[in-house]
Image (cartoon, grey):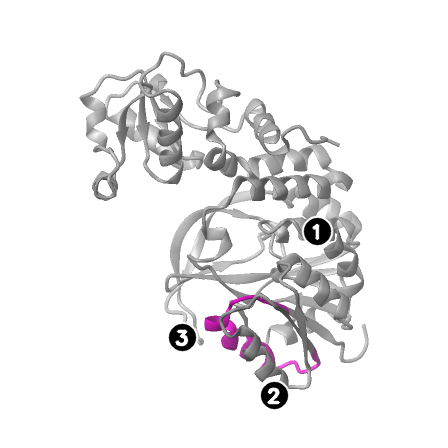
Amino acid sequence: MEGNLLLSVIVPVYNAAPYLRKCLDSILHQTYRNLEIILAVDGGCSDGSVEICEEYSLKDARIKLLERPHEGLVSARKAGVAAATGEYVAYVDSDDWMEADACQRMTDLVKSLAPDVLIYGLWEEYQGRVFECPCQILPGYYDAIGMEKEIYPHMLERRYIDQKEILPYAEQNGIEKASGRCVHYPVIHPSVWSKLVKRELLEQTQKMVPDSVIMGEDLVCTLYTLFRAQSVMVTDDMLYHYQRRDDSASMNNVPFDQYKYMFNASWAALQKSPLRDFHRKQLCEWMLDAALLTKYEAFLEKFSELPFGPLENLRIALYGAGQLGQEIYRKTKAVFPERITLWVDQNYRLYQEAGLPVEPVRRLLEEAYDVVVIALVNEVICKEIKQNLVSMSIEPGKVRYVTKSPDLLEAVRAIFQDGESRG
């Protein structure tokens, strides 16, 4: 690829005033200057975001201001791509920001081999902590054959990784790293903002994302894009800063219908996958948490032997009072009031202060029950908890937790598809 290629940077904007200036400054001050900056501004903004975008558009002629109806993120992205003229497109969410030389490093990486997609790493920032989130594919260039071997098998895979924390981030030189947290993390991050994509490809694939998908829309677009790409380049460069917020859509209680739209749109995106059955199984694994947290009543009423095995006429000691534990307790009590006879958690005092009838774990040695149900989906942690319980002289056969059996994954599909076509 010859010359000083033009990059289109698309920023959908909706009520992001507290973060927007930092986002836009990070783009305007890129060391690489040949940028087309498209601000797709939602007309429903009520916090001054529109005025900020108008102010910045007067500062820099590279900015294109698209004032949009209040139609959502997917619609804004589609409008942004339609207005773009660059050879490649990068997305930036309006509450995130880029490394100062991100665009320069992107162009340096793609200019010789011109891959359809460049995948790069990101920093995840949350409550003052910063974690390193690289793509877990070996860096390099992958043609169509290489993608079949090294990209496609990992499209929806998650691995338990020791995610490094950056301490402190403010020291730009000689960044100090420390072991941070063990997380179940995607091998390839589903976000569109961790990828640079050829415009001619993205023009096709962004259109395929239904406007009704307002959660998981990145995953749907990423699936369509990678399955239609002929080449991918992976770098371990960390170019993007993702700010995870407590008030963001991904952090709030999400209605079941939104999970359903996401699942069915992703299911459709996998239609052309060369590993379709494998990927659809992985999609069901991906969505298991959401099924348990939004439709646990289906397991009580329709799939009564899942996910913990038969529980009829058994007295349950529920271990864990987090989001899943509370969902299980609340919905089980509504359907089978006498089934849960004891609820325990190591942090019982915290939950008692919130008015929940949670008791200390030692009560497992004092009360009568038939099985202990561990209310977590992380099998690694569940196994550790089981070992701890066994060391307390609790019988191993009494301890149950979620395992991803074929029957359970089929139940997840049935919950989200709800009679829709399985094609």
Look at the image and say whether residue 27 sits in the magenta stretch: yes
Calculate the distance from the C-alpha at mark 2 to the C-alpha at mark 3: 30 Å
Look at the image and say whether residue 340 sits in the magenta stretch: no
Q: Which label's residue is closer to the chain start, 1 or 2?
A: 2
Q: Position of residue 237 (x, y in %)?
A: 58, 65
Q: Quadrant of the N terminus?
A: bottom right
Q: Which residue is located at x 49 percent, y 37 percent?
A: 289
Of residues 161 and 8, the one nearer the viewer is 8
Q: Secondary structure at mark 2?
A: helix
Q: Which label's residue is closer to the chain start, 2 or 3?
A: 2
Q: Which residue is located at x 69 percent, y 47 percent?
A: 150
The amino acid marked with disc number 1 is: Val
| Residue 387 marker | none
Q: Quadrant of residue 338?
A: top left
> Which stretch is magenta?
11-35
Tag 2 residue: 59
Q: Position of residue 4 (x, y in %)?
A: 76, 80
Tag 3 residue: 171
Q: Secondary structure at mark 3?
A: loop
Tell whether label 1 touches label 3 (CB within 8 Å): no
**Residue 30 visible within the image:** no
**Residue 189 visible within the image:** yes
What residue occupies the far left of the structure in this picture? 366
Tell whether label 2 touches label 1 (CB within 8 Å): no
Q: Position of residue 384 (x, y in %)?
A: 35, 33
Mark 3 neighbour density, 10 Å: few (under 14) some (14–19) many (20 or more): few
Q: Which residue is located at x 74 percent, y 68 percent?
A: 88
Please give left or right for residue 320 compared with residue 82 in the image: left
The amino acid marked with disc number 2 is: Lys
What residue occupies the far top of the structure in this picture? 313
Calculate the distance from the C-alpha at mark 3 to the C-alpha at mark 1: 40 Å
Q: Position of residue 389 (x, y in %)?
A: 28, 27
